[in-house]
Amino acid sequence: MKQSLQLKLGQQLTMTPQLQQAIRLLQLSTLDLQQEIQQALDSNPLLETAEDDDSPEPADNTERHSEATRESGDGPLESLEGTAADNTGDDGEWQASMPEDLPVDTQWDDLLPSASAPAASGPDEGGDYDFESRNSSGESLQDRLRWQLNLTRLSDVDRVIALAIIDATDHNGRLTSPLEDILESLTGANLDIEMDEVVAVLHCLQQFEPAGVCARDLQECLLIQLGQLPPDTPYLDAARTIVSRHMNQLGAGDHQQILRRARLTEDDLRQALGLIRSLDPNPGLSVESDDTEYIVPDVFVRKLNQRWVVELNPDIAPRLRINSNYASLIKRADNSADNTFLKDNLQEARWFLKSLQSRNETLMKVASKIVEHQRNFLEYGEEAMKPLVLHDIAEAVDMHESTISRVTTRKYMHTPRGIFELKYFFSSHVGTAGGGECSSTAIRALIKKLVAAENPRKPLSDNKITQLLEDQGIQVARRTVAKYRDTLLIPPSNERKRLV
């Protein structure tokens, strides 16, 4: 084999560190971006936040600024100097007036103001400061039940049984273990306990708040809540009869069987069902307090002079700049370790600022094109949503589809109709009778509208919804309607049947 030298030309995409950083910042959510910026500020001394009121002043102006503050009287020294002027003489000694006759138990703290005394806060002045709600962590259902158990007078054995039942209760308030298993676990601990004692303690716990906890099934949970209502509650007996004797027909929505077996009128059944629907099938969820996560929109959309305007949210990230003091210390011909450190951090700071600017520009381009394409949605709602795919926006902004996917993931848009993720505006299309296209989001909105306006006695079936959509020129299969209905959490027609 003979060796030779050859010259070839070719193109190759190289992922430079700058490009990798830009792509990584592009796919970050608002919260992750704020953490990334904070890490950059902590690690790079050349980066700093640019406040609105920042105005660099020379070092020799510091003293003049302090004197101007004193003369204007609007600085923080005003109150201190005013107090000192009242109580200090020409020689600088304290001249506070004190009474000549003082009680025997008088202390200096009673006469002189304490510099370390805490200032009175707003909530304390009113006397209604809720310290527990501001500083307490989320309380679980088991904690609430144990707290009520400590207020109940029970024997030591009954308390052990109660704790075992509470541990076997899930966050919904439902008992997850049979009483036989609980009894077996207690007798294995060398305790002489009978089943009657376990049942008695269970009934005691079922009187705790929230109503319906420690129930073994849904039927018992509803009966417990009905039993704690006042005896003069309207239609209480009818509701108790339906839950205790006709639970299967109630779950299946077979109201005709309930009418015939319970011998109730339609009005009585309707009122009793309304009372049953007011009960909580998962009472434990009212105690479990999850931390609410608020969505911070990345862009705002508003209508200005009959035009839809897109603006970046200025609060999602602080404005950054390069520290001019540190940058001025860099010398070109100096190769010392300190100078090299400053040079490297200056270059990283510039790359970081450029990547942030590129992220904002790309986000604005994509959001503007989405608003331009979905203007009818902003004007008329979900029924006017147009079909849109990533390829359409990618062609409009001259970018790759993967870039559009990164931009629209975990980015949110604040509109007059609510806050939506950018991916919400992308949907597939379905053909219409006129040869056009209809968005799947618009079809789901139409299905939801049709179901909301249906007759509860004769709810619309999937075939009927398909026919109604065809009457509007939308050609969609029945199985597609069933799939969209499931995504909207709308039950089938037999389960939606209600009495008027």
Image (cartoon, rainbow, N blue to C red):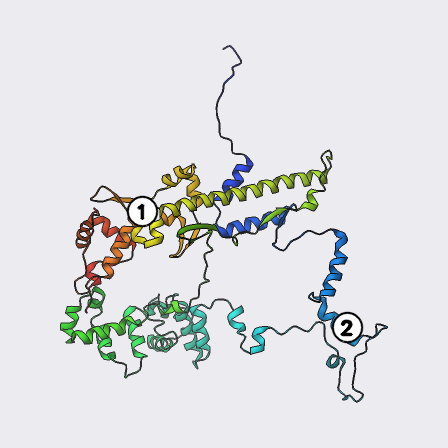
Q: Which is more toward the observer, 267 or 161?
A: 267
Which of the 4 quarters of the picture holds residue 455?
bottom left
Viewer can see residue 47: yes
Which of the 4 quarters of the picture holds residue 93?
bottom right
Which residue extends farthest left?
Answer: 260
Q: Is residue 394 left or right of residue 18?
A: left
- Tell me the tag on residue 386: 1
Q: Which is more toward the observer, 172 or 263?
A: 263
Q: Is residue 136 above or below residue 489?
A: below
* Image coordinates for residue 170, horizontal then vertical, percent: 38, 65
The residue carrying mark 2 is 84
Q: At 23% from the left edge and 65% from the top edge, which residue is drawn? A: 251
Q: At 35% from the left edge and 66% from the top edge, which residue is drawn? A: 177
The residues bearing labels 1 and 2 have C-alpha atoms spaced at a distance of 71 Å
* Image coordinates for residue 393, horizontal then vertical, percent: 39, 41
Kind of residue at badge 1: Lys
* Image coordinates for residue 122, horizontal then vertical, percent: 58, 73
User: Are there few (<14), some (14-19), or many (20+) residues within 10 Å of tag 1?
Assistant: many
Q: At 34% from the left edge and 51% from the top edge, which residue is drawn? A: 377
Q: Is residue 67 left or right of residue 353?
A: right
Viewer can see residue 408: no
